[in-house]
Image (cartoon, helix red, strand yellow):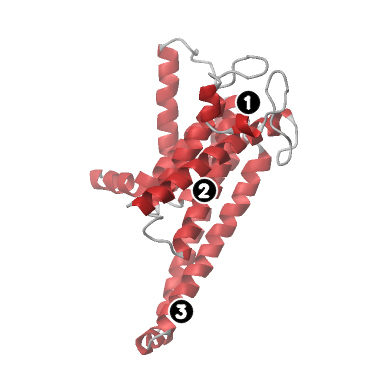
Amino acid sequence: MLFDILIYFIVFVSGLFIGSFLNLVSDRLEKGGDVLFGRSACDFCKTELSWRELIPIVTFLLQKGKCAKCGKKLSLYHPFSELMTGLVFLSFAYFVKLPLNLTLLTWGLFFFYIVLFSFFLIIFLSDLKFMIIPDKVVIPAIVFSTLSVLGSVAFYSYDLYKQLSSSEFGVYLIKAGFLKFHALLVLRNAGMSFAGAFGISLFFLLLIFLTKGRGMGGGDVKLGFLIGLVNGFPLSVVAIFLGFLIGAMYSLLLVLFKKKSLKGTIPFGPFLIIGSYLTVFFGNFLFEWYLRLL
């Protein structure tokens, strides 16, 4: 029990620090600056920050949300990005049951999710703050996801081969074509992921054409492709539906409270990312529930 808590605590705290970095990346991609090696500084007086001023959440609370040098109020994006990343990392540690399964496969799956959603979180923050989905983030994320999908096909096929070849009955199954059948099945699922990714991209392109670019942009098309790879088919459809639903509800609330007009625009990428995130955890349940309604 204590070991489980320790693992979750380490994951959460690591997420806080990484979240601070991801927020910095989202800013520097838009405003300029060295993404990897540039020193952190106050947004207003540009004073370089010491390590004591870079402790996630704690520094913000101790300084009452203000710069220690100039006294200007700091953006809430700082604690928001840190806490959000910490919770996202923690949720994936729980999802893969990290403390209970300290195997290479479990760590690999956890690594896949935290790297992928680190890309997602930069996109989330960039679109939320600057209404842009940077190619410098979404394209590497697509490459990473593509390699992960192809790598999973090879890994699962090889892992099954190792298990089968260790017994006489397994060797018989290999000769009978069971391994080939399994490999083709895994390959088909990967192919469905790519087909779903292209399908979502084409759907978004159609929406851009019909709305003359008012509803979404090219960055959303690439993000849709990425979500198709991440969630696979048909769960990517669930992710897009959830994104549209949550986005529509949020827009309606803004209109009702007169924060936006009906012609106003909001960043759509964050809602697609929320939809993709929720689908990882609840996608199968929602899809099966929908099928039971038919």
In the displayed structure, does residue 67 sit left or right of residue 109?
Answer: right
Compared to residue 242, the image places residue 189 above or below, namely: below
Task: Report the quarter where the C terminus lies.
Answer: top left
Compared to residue 143, the image places residue 249 above or below, namely: above
The residue beneath circle 2 is: 114
Task: Give the number of marks.
Answer: 3
Q: CA distance from mark 3 to mark 1?
A: 49 Å
Compared to residue 26, the image places residue 141 above or below, namely: below
Instruction: Judge the density around disc 3: few (<14), some (14-19), many (≥20) Cα neighbours within 10 Å.
Output: few
Kind of residue sitting beneath label 1 = Phe
Q: Earlier in the sequence, mark 2 or mark 1?
A: 2
Residue 195 visible to an observer of this rendering: no
The residue beneath circle 3 is: 162
Q: Earlier in the sequence, mark 3 or mark 1?
A: 1
Q: Are marks 3 and 1 in contact (CB under 8 Å)?
A: no
Q: Secondary structure at mark 3?
A: helix
